[in-house]
């Protein structure tokens, strides 16, 4: 399948590399794929020239990556997501599934970051993206775990869940199929329509805290019930 | 042990009834324990006159309940908690452990409620209570599950966790001992100091969503790690 990834940080690189290696055709879009940006190392990530050479995936502009994808993944920093997706272009996203992996974390007060008030509380980043791109089927997924767990859930030996939300049952089914075949996810908890993104994005404050407690990002949550 | 409970709703009634029945001496405080308030049924809760007759616990004013408790429990609605605890009196809480069970849920836009911006993001209700009552050891606990699970975790057959946060390790140890002996809790995840309340309070949006999905409040989360 042709996959477009918007955002060249550690999340985009992890997802894009694994998807390319499992037989998909990946184009990763950044704002300005100049020599400088290709050669610059990012936080927790490779220079994109090295990443492209290692994975065989292509690095291009955001509009070109969105146009390439049959499914597009938003792997930008949450506070920049709406602007980045506008740059990618509504026309390049129309009629497609957008997997929204981002979280609206505000780092302006330093660590720990917090959920931005404009994109949390009575709304969420997932909902705001869906409102801004009504012709796109937004599926919130993968935003509650670290990169390493996203692409290899078996790194955690016990059962654990991937929370998913979106307005279209068909789109969620397509996303589940991709996440199962490419990454090995088997346990999904469907939170219903895109309003469920309020729930999964709000897992970030406890995720950040558990990262500190566990001293490893290789953890997740399991929902258990009577 | 003498336990003071601030708040006469379903949470306070569930906790107070179970604590009284397990050998503790419970005084439950409300704003105005007049005949009217004692006889009025509350959301999801009994008229307090019936509750007191059934459980043998005492209903009194907030200051009297706080003064009675060796450990005090904040079981008020989160948006009212700071005002209610001020009414209970800092002098009646000084030198004591306060178990904060409340969540800063704002219902002013109807359902679903959302985390109030003034008490979430870069702060939390637990932290604001600790700041307002510096002579009290605030322990955030029990705020991530339904009343029924709070007092009987065995209703969920699989392993699941109680998240706890607070500045004092000794206070957290005392709270864990009480929750184990009175309710049967055995699995705790300690999130560190009271800033960890940001994590547990932010579980409410997904809790509300999972309640809808599961059609039962008898569920919880388990943290799993590599």
Image: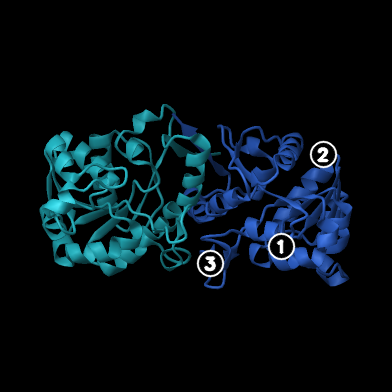
Chain colours: A blue, B cyan
Marks 1/3: CA–CA distance: 18 Å
Residue annotated with mark 1:
A132
Q: What chain does badge 2 belong to?
A: A
Vertical arrangement, residue A199 with respect to residue A49, above or below: above
Mark 2–mark 1 distance (CA, rounded to whole Å): 32 Å
Relative to A18, A34 lies left or right: right
Give the class, few, some or many, for how many residues have Cα within 10 Å of label 2's Cα (few <14, many ≥20). Answer: few
Instruction: Work out whether disc 1 and disc 3 sit on a shared chain.
Output: yes
Q: Earlier in the sequence, mark 1 or mark 3?
A: 3
The circle drawn on residue A22 is: 2
Q: Is residue A11 left or right of residue A192?
A: right
Give x and y (percent) for residue B51: 18, 40
Q: Which residue is mark 3?
A: A117
Q: How many marks?
A: 3
Earlier in the chain: of badge 2 and badge 1, it is 2
- Residues under labels 3 and 2: Cα distance? 38 Å
* Residue B58 pos. (x, y %): 11, 45
Marks 2 & 1, CB-CB < 8 Å contact: no
Whether residue A59 appears in this view of the structure is no
- Label number found at residue A200: none
- Disc 1 element: helix
* B3 up-or-down from B155: above or below: below
The chain ID associated with circle 1 is A
> Would you call the spot at circle 3 few (<14 residues within 10 Å), some (14-19), or many (20 or more)?
many
User: Which quadrant holds residue B161?
Assistant: top left
């Amino acid at each position: 399948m042709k996959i477009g990834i918007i955002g060249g940080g550690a999340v985009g690189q992890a997802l894009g590399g694994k998807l390319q290696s499992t037989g998909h055709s990946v184009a990763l879009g950044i704002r300005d794929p100049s020599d400088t940006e290709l050669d610059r190392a990012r936080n927790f990530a490779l220079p994109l020239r090295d990443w492209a050479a290692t994975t065989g995936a292509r690095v291009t502009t955001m509009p070109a990556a969105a146009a390439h994808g049959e499914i597009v993944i938003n792997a930008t920093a949450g506070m920049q997501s709406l602007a980045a997706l506008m740059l990618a272009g509504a026309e390049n996203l129309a009629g497609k599934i957008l997997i929204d992996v981002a979280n609206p974390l505000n780092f302006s007060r330093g660590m720990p970051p917090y959920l931005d008030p404009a994109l949390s509380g009575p709304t969420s980043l997932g909902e705001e993206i869906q409102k801004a791109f009504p012709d796109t089927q937004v599926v919130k997924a993968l935003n509650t775990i670290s990169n390493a767990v996203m692409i290899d859930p078996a790194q955690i030996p016990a059962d654990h869940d991937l929370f998913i939300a979106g307005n279209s049952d068909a789109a969620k089914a397509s996303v589940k199929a991709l996440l199962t075949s490419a990454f090995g996810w088997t346990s999904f908890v469907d939170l219903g329509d895109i309003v469920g993104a309020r729930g999964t994005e709000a897992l970030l404050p406890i995720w950040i805290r558990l990262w500190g407690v566990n001293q490893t990002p290789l953890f997740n949550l399991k929902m258990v019930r009577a």
